[in-house]
Amino acid sequence: MEQQNNQPQDLYREDVAGRANVADTPELLRYYSELDKLDAGALWTVANKIEPWQPASASVPMIWRYADLRDKVLKSVELVTPEKAGRRVIYLANPGRRDVTAAVGWLYSGLQVMNAGEVASAHAHSASALRFIMEGTGAYTIVDGHRMSLGANDFVLTPNGTWHEHGVDSSGTTCIWQDGLDIPLVNALEANFYSVHPDLQQKVGYPVDDVTGAWGNPGLVPSTGTWSKGYSPLLKYEWAPTYEALQRFARATDGCEFDGVMMNYINPVTGGPVMHTIGAAMQMLRPGEKTKAHRHTGSIIYQCCKGSGYSIVAGQRLEWKERDIFCVPSWAWHEHCNTSASDDACLFTFNDLPAIRALGLYREEAFGENGGQQPLN
Ligand SMILES: [Fe+2]
Ligand SMILES: [Fe+2]
């Protein structure tokens, strides 16, 4: 028996010249059903939905407070081993993006915990990944044979395609770090591969921390050898020189009206972003500093790594302090404030801006009205 879809098909009509505005009729509904049976459809029934006037992010502004999550993260140590879990991680779920396991937009994030003496197996994947160390001592990462020792607020890359593994020295303490990856993006592009290292562990092929020795010197790169991969050879960015650089920059600039004193982590060979698809930065808000609101395409994940304050994201005030993580969805207005009158506040951020820019999709605008500050919802 012939079945006809009686659902309304004119839900997205707009009474605007140039936009789809076709009301359902019995004849049209019959026609849409015939098209549906041929696995086809009339564009005007969905055009206004799939081509919004401006980005319509499904992500919502979120803050994940460390005080709420830390105990739960530590609990996972009792419940699963790294061997069984592969990676013992509690991921951050944006209510609008649970279907793709994203913290915001096309970015994934999670909190990983390892006890002293634990080692996770070496693996490689098409997703680009980073870690930002939150607490503990003795953590290390090995990337393609380069072993890096890691402390709080150090930032380390495990780029697309590299063999990498994580562990904590037996002399260390329980370590927690934030993982950031573009898994949702790579899955959306249907380009994700994952491999477990055939020996489960890889050999260290270089002196420990050779990457910072070779590539971590301001304004200097090795005079011999070449680097042509699409990610930074400086796989580790240590906190102490990063913070010192921000302080030095703060003495040399009035800062950016939207971000305060902000510096990008870069590939020292190209001056470009650290990885193909993910960029990262550290921003410092000086005591009492309050920035103006702007918005741009691309999604941002922030971790407060020093101080306290708040950000207003899409009219929502998010109070943060050290180790809290929050997100700014694409095209959402955002502004930041350091509420301390005496101490600076630092926000580590990572984003999908290299992917957005490579695709020619970056756009930015200032809030403008109301002295650049958003009204609260
Ligand atoms: Fe990984
Ligand atoms: Fe921004």
Image: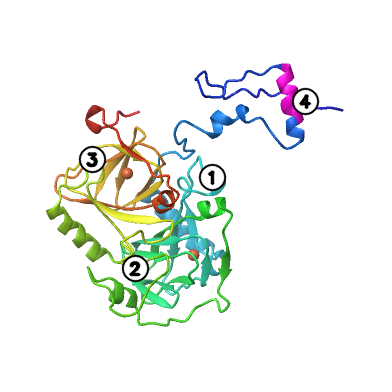
Q: Which numbered dot is residue 291? A: 3
Q: Earlier in the sequence, mark 4 or mark 3?
A: 4
The answer to whether 56 appears left or right of 34 in the picture is left
Q: Earlier in the sequence, mark 1 or mark 2?
A: 1
Q: Residue type at mark 2: give it.
A: Lys
Label pair 4/1, CB-CB below 8 angstroms: no
The residue sitting at 25% across, 47% down in the picture is 308
Q: How many other residues sit within 10 Å of disc 1, few (<14), some (14-19) or many (≥20)?
A: few
Q: Which numbered dot is residue 191? A: none
Camera-side mark, 4 or 3? 4
Residue 357 on image: x %, y %: 40, 50
Magenta run includes residue 32: yes
Q: Earlier in the sequence, mark 2 or mark 4?
A: 4
Magenta run includes residue 127: no
Can the viewer see residue 209 in this picture? no
The residue sitting at 18% across, 45% down in the picture is 340
Q: Could you tell me how far apart the alpha carbons at marks 2 and 4 are, in whole angstroms?
A: 60 Å
Q: Residue type at mark 3: give it.
A: Thr
Q: Which numbered dot is residue 4? A: 4
Magenta segment: 26-34
Q: Earlier in the sequence, mark 2 or mark 3?
A: 2
Q: How many other residues sit within 10 Å of disc 3, few (<14), some (14-19) or many (≥20)?
A: many
Residue at label 2?
Answer: 236
Element under disc 4: loop
Q: Please say if 146 is above or below 194.
A: below
Q: Please say if 100 is above or below 372.
A: below
Q: Residue type at mark 4: give it.
A: Gln
Camera-side mark, 1 or 2? 2
